[in-house]
Amino acid sequence: MPTPPNPRSCARCRSRLASDNADRFCAACRKQAADDLVRPPDVPRSFWHDEQMRGALDSWHMGRVFTAYRAHPYHGRVLSQELVAGWLNLTQAQLSRIESGRAPEELSKLTYWSTVLRIPSVLLWFKVRGERTPQTTTREHPAPIRLAPLHKAAENSATARTMGLLASLTANRVPATTAAVPLKAVGAFDGLSLAESASQLLGLFLQLDDQLGGDVLYAPLSQYVARMAVAVEVDPSDGLLAFGQLSQMAGWLAVDGNRHGEARRFLTTAVYVGHEADDPGLAASATAYMSLHAMYRGEPGTALALAKTARATDESALTPLTRTMLATREARAHAGLGNERECLRALDDTRSSYDGNGQVEEPLWLSYVDKVEVAAQEGACYLGLGRPREAEAALTNALSLLDEHAPHRVRDRVHYLSRLAKTHLLVSDVEQACAVATEALQLSEAIGSARVAERLSEFREALAPFADTRAGREFAERLKQTRR
């Protein structure tokens, strides 16, 4: 009598697999594996009592805990450093250094990482502080940075569908060169149109952009936009405007990641869609992004021409926040050219336009235009005009507003600090300049933004006249270590 074959079981939950299931996972665990691409899985209590995991926890070395976590048999495979780094708000290189280097000792980071992975506090070698009511903050004692709890947002069904789509984007990458590769049109979420699905995705990327930066987010969104273009070409009636809005977002992420060719391509597409879909606000906004891009590339003349083109749009067709943003772009270009009177006039327009916000419904893609942004743009303009005292006041105000209203916007904080450091350098306060720049440098390790790295390098170059000072040498060494 032939011996029956050994029953196969799921590599994750150990339940028996159906005879026609050739996969290593049951259907439920396969779905969970897709969700795990955007957040850590829910693991059983026994997960933390695995021999390798307990050994790592007993070593008091969070890097070893990460290694044991990635290699845990529960996952059915060794999780990549890139995947786990995304959960922890790190780059793959940073996670690699943590796993192989000295044991991290900064309590705030240990607390954050253990919270993300949901490690039982009783197994930790440090005390996890509970949430406290924020006290009055100062520049010396700023409010702690808190990242928005994305995993809790997934309890909302629409957001959960968005997270699922992001997981599929990450799992099914579009090749970098797609000219000869036929792309399949992207589908909509269940129960939503393609336009509604794209709106959900736009909201998610706007939130992630505040915390992660363009280096991390550009690839998945650009892949989605490439697929969406196929669907929109077949049926422009569903999703054309949303496609333009996502193209603008992809263009911005490309700008943040210093992908100049891709930025121009996506922003040009957004301008075209704005006109095609009869949305002058989108067309003007994308043109204004092109102006900002030119500023970052050191082309203030081109930036001014583009900003003026954007502001030539009929104002009656624009919302208050759109007009606010367009005025800031022109002000920045004038500052770059040293046109003080015109810059200050554009800043007046910025403030008056912002005062009118709240009268009409604003587009989702303008959600970043708030009082923090207005103060920060004022600071950038004053800095460009060589007026350090006014710049310092505006940037300090922007940081204070950030502490109060949006402490999770890490990349913005790094930008404001790097500009604030330059204001101190302009008045030869080298120690204060380097102290602020060092704070920006430390925070920059938590995000992926080539533009941020470029700003910090610019500060290092501006330090050249003070290279022999103690503060200058220490900052240069810290920057060198961070780059490694």
Image: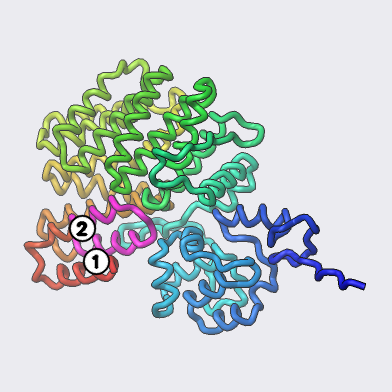
- Residue 99 place in picture, x, y as percent: 45, 74
Left or right of 12 in this view: 321: left
Q: Which range is magenta?
A: 433-458
Q: How crowded is mark 2: few (under 14 residues within 10 Å), some or many (20 or more)?
A: some
- What residue sits 25% from the left and 19% below the top? 312
- Residue 221 place in picture, x, y as percent: 45, 42
Residue 246 in sight in this render = yes
Indicate whether 38 appears above or below 296.
below
Instruction: Tell whether position 435 is magenta.
Output: yes
Split into 4 quadrants, where in the image is the C terminus? bottom left
Comparing 238 with 122, the one in front is 238
Left or right of 177 in this view: 471: left
Residue to which mark 1 is pinned: 479
- What residue sits 78% from the left and 61% below the top? 17
* Residue type beneath disc 1: Leu
Label 1 to label 2: alpha-carbon separation: 8 Å
Split into 4 quadrants, where in the image is the N terminus? bottom right
Comparing 202 with 428, the one in front is 202
Q: Quick one: which residue is furthest to the right in this view?
A: 1
Residue to which mark 2 is pinned: 457
